[in-house]
Amino acid sequence: MISVGGQQLMDVIAALQDEANKLKKQLDTVLHAMRLLGGSKGKTKSKPVSIKRRRMSAAGKARIAAAQKARWAKVRAAKKKAA
């Protein structure tokens, strides 16, 4: 085991307390900035944001289906020629 003197232990505790105070100040700064920017307003829950989905027209679906059918027809024709 490592033996640590009383003064060394007190120095470590003081350093940890200083670091904790610095982190608390940084947290306060960030929370203040969030409040200014309209972010978190305490412990209230915000409404979930809905995602708008793009809708495809029937004509667009038909064009895609026709193109895919043409691709498969081309593959089948190439397969018949090879056989």
Image: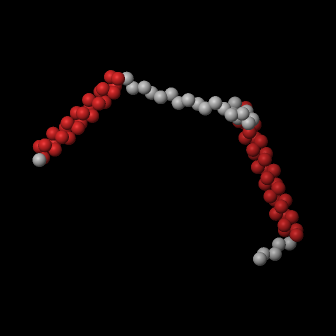
Left or right: where 11 falls relative to 49 = right
Of residue 8 and residue 76, the one placed in the foreground of this image is: 76
Image quadrant where residue 38 sits: top right
Q: Report x, y in % for residue 57.
A: 37, 23
| Vertical side of 69 occupied by 23: above or below | below
Left or right: where 12 falls relative to 60 = right
Q: Residue at x 33, y 27 (%)?
A: 61
Name, please, the residue furthest toward the right.
6
Q: Report x, y in % for residue 22.
A: 79, 50
Q: Report x, y in % for residue 66.
A: 26, 29
Of residue 27 and residue 40, the one placed in the foreground of this image is: 40
Q: Residue at x 64, y 30 (%)?
A: 47
Q: Residue at x 20, y 36 (%)?
A: 73
Of residue 66 and residue 1, the one placed in the foreground of this image is: 66
Q: Is residue 16 visible?
A: yes
Image quadrant where residue 49 sits: top right
The colour scheme used to paint the residues is: secondary structure
Q: Report x, y in % for residue 53.
A: 47, 28
Image quadrant where residue 15 sits: bottom right
Q: Residue at x 61, y 32 (%)?
A: 48
Q: Is residue 37 visible?
A: no
How many labels sit on residues? 0
Left or right: where 57 falls relative to 23 = left
Quadrant of the snapshot with the N terminus: bottom right
Name, please, the residue furthest toward the bottom.
1
